[in-house]
Image (spheres, helix red, strand yellow):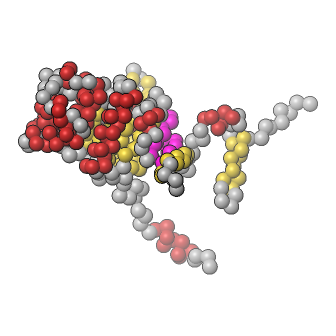
Amino acid sequence: MNPTLSELEAQAGAPRAAFGGDAHIVCDNLVRIYKTEGVEVVALQGLDLLIDEGELVAVVGASGSGKSTLLNVLSGLDVPTAGVARVAGMDLLSMTAKDRLRYRREVVGFIWQQTARNLLPYLTARENAELPVRLAGRRGKGRAMELLDLLGVADRAGRRPGELSGGEQQRVAIAVALANSPQLILADEPTGELDSDTSEEVFDALRKANRELGVTVVIVTHDPLVAEQVDRTIGIRDGRTSSETLRREGAEGQVVAEEYAVLDRVGRLQLPRDFMNALNMERRVRLELESDHIGVWPAREEPSGEQ
């Protein structure tokens, strides 16, 4: 039976759940525009993103795709131009300077690609891990040693960064990022300066922090070995989320990866470039609605009008 007009009006007027619901990270039509010497650069062009609490995800994309801008926004280092960006219920667009400082100290931890940038060179590993807690007005020696032990570098507690390998420095940096028990860890190419074996050690440390401490972890990476070891890999292209790869365990214990295109809130869909190139799709495509799918075809060539 078809609904009546009054029923349709009631449905239209009923309150709807907010986009993202209880997601830990919510980006809704997120825009970031930079102005440099009178030139506007749109780094994020209406990006939508949902990440649940406790997830371990990788964000990938070509240089200039907007992934580093996204990380800077989520870390509180950069302020969005428009849209919605929330982390743990905190609105990143409306924060005061005081709220933003507290957010960076208590809610989020950040790990840079450059190992030397994460640690103070004149402090030992333990002192570096204690520092965020001391700055927050608490005692941090016990917490620091617990984290260094969890991450497999407790035996390096008394050494300064110059006496540590690159992988050890990054694991100490993870301890520093975890020192104030943040809800979110952001890592910008944390294995970018490391060899494959050392990269595996650093990623294992991030995975251990995620699983044992329950902290949400978002990793921006070009490293396919890292991207393939998370349950969800999010692709960004031209300032928007373009794809997601979901991984699950198959019936025989093997890892099964399925790649999906992302449909945003207004129905935009980014087709993979290699698909478009293979079928010579440019500017316009034909769509046909079937019972269980939508077909997409190259536009028919129009007659030139020549005799």
Q: Residue 234 at x, y = what percent?
A: 46, 42
Q: Residue 175 at x, y = what percent?
A: 22, 37
What residue is drawn where x is 46% and y is 68%? 13
* 266 to the left or right of 68: right
* 299 to the left or right of 57: right
What residue is drawn where x is 49% and y is 67%? 12
Image position of 126 with respect to 185: above or below = above
Quadrant of the rendered structure where residue 117 is?
top left
Name the residue nearer the viewer: 18 or 103: 103
What residue is drawn where x is 15% and y is 31%? 157
* 302 to the left or right of 29: right
Image quarter where the C terminus lies is top right
User: Can the viewer see residue 44?
Assistant: no
Q: Which residue is situated farthest in the bottom direction here?
A: 1
The verdict on residue 73 being magenta is: no
Q: Residue 278 at x, y = what percent?
A: 69, 34
How many dots with numbers? 0
Image position of 112 with respect to 88: above or below = above
Q: Which residue is situated farthest in the right direction here?
A: 307
State the extent of the magenta-drawn residues as a range.
Answer: 232-247
* 222 to the left or right of 303: left
Image position of 25 with respect to 221: above or below = below
Image quarter where the N terminus lies is bottom right
Name the residue nearer the viewer: 218 or 13: 218
Dominant SS of magenta comes to strand
